[in-house]
Amino acid sequence: MTSTSTLLKQLLHTDSRPNPWPLYADLRAEPVSLQDDGTYVVSGYDEVSALLRDPRVSADPGYAAPGSRIGARAMAPRTAPAFLVRDNPEHDRLRGLVQRHFGPPARPGFVEGLRPMVEELIRDHIDGLVGRTEFDLVSELAFPVPVSVACHLLGIPPEDAERLGPLAEETVATPEFRVDPYDPESAATSSHAQEELTAYFVAHIQRLRENPGPDILSSMIHDDGPDGPMTLPELLSTCQLLFIGGHETTVNLITNSMLLLLRHPEQLARLQADPSLAAGVVEETLRLEPSVHLRPRIAVDDIHIGEHTIPKGASVILALAAANRDPRRFPDPDTFDITRPDTAHLSFGGGLHFCFGAPLGRMEGQIAVRELTRRLVNPRVLQDSPPYRPLPDLRGPSALRLAVDEVRPT
């Protein structure tokens, strides 16, 4: 058997971005593998699913051992930790303060109420393609639509999105997913982007403090509920999380969905014949070509799993993308089937940290693929394989150039 001890570094290298799947298959040969830098990579479905829900596994990088892969993240400059990287009780307190303004139980219809706006945004962006026979799906729709939704939620002027997008890209390039997590040049770039993003949101929060709007950030700033208002550092970390998480993954979801459909014309034809299959497209895309490939965790106690004992303080990488193609869990796991009856993927995580924005991301993805495949006549990919973003954990094309015979009017 080929050694698995260097596979993580190979995965993190940009050369692996177009086709990481053979490396994930090699990892699954040993579902829990110790890497040569002391990191444990977990790639089997059952193992990843169990650790996502295990209280002995923490999302807080502060627990990482000094000098470890995730220890590099603990050293990186940042605002107060968002609930994404907190454990209970702080996780539930902060997440609850946001949930009161975003969804059930306080606002059960909030996300669904965004549907008309999302439909209009997508329709308008496709309208802008009428008369063209070639375009880049990422820059014309897959990026601007989720960014516009995130700006709407946070009261951000739409014209600021162009400035904030590149900063968000640099900020999410976290050190644990670099080949060298302690690379000083990458750390400096990320730190500078974080400083600029923080400065923007400090000013933005102050504007909304003085002139609140109907957005959820204004509601959080002025929340006088029983748990009290968030502090400024908590507001900063939360609004950055919602802005970045609210568009980065959805850009990939829309782009990956369309790329899979165009690579599988028989599945595209099924969707065009039955637009209700859009939900199946999104779920199968999330399984087969997920937006999020890797999640970092830290063992806060010794954990016995399989033939390994992950020691307390060890860095743990949960390979969601590998688990989603585990043949022990899914029949024909490398096949794209939009009517697959069981798509219980792990792409939104699980347990305490199940993705906060999953309902909104699903809705945006479903509307986008339904409308694109309805209105694009004979769409095809001009460059396959397309160029990919450099991030290994948030994997998706940086551009997807398409050709069409025409774009149908609304």
Image (cartoon, grey):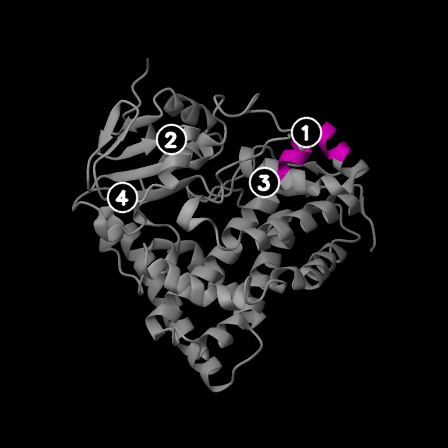
Q: Which residue is label 3 attached to?
A: 256
The mark closer to the camera, 3 or 2, is 2
Mark 4 or 1, nearer chain start: 1
Please identify the dominant SS of the magenta region: helix
Q: Residue 394 at x, y = what percent?
A: 45, 45
| Dot placed on the residue nearer the N-terminal end, 2 or 1 | 2
Label annotation for residue 47: 2
Residues in magenta, as a range: 256-270
Figure check: 108 above or below 330: below
Pick out the residue farthest to the top.
Answer: 1
Q: Amino acid at mark 1?
A: His
Q: Position of residue 266 (x, y in %)?
A: 73, 28
Q: Residue furthest right?
A: 409
Q: CA distance from mark 3 to mark 4?
A: 30 Å
Who comes first in sequence, dot 3 or dot 2? Answer: 2
Residue shown at 37% from the left, 50% from the top: 173
Q: Residues within 10 Å of mark 3 (few under 14, many from 20)?
A: many
Q: Secondary structure at mark 2?
A: helix
The residues bearing labels 2 and 1 have C-alpha atoms spaced at a distance of 31 Å
Q: Position of residue 6 (x, y in %)?
A: 29, 27
Q: Earlier in the sequence, mark 4 or mark 2?
A: 2
Q: Could you tell me residue 255's position as x and y percent?
A: 60, 44
Residue sitting at x 38%, y 59%:
92
Looking at the image, tell me whether mark 3 or mark 4 is earlier in sequence order.
3
Residue at point 30%, 24% (across, down): 306
Q: Nearer the viewer, mark 4 or mark 1?
A: 4
- To which residue does mark 4 refer? 298
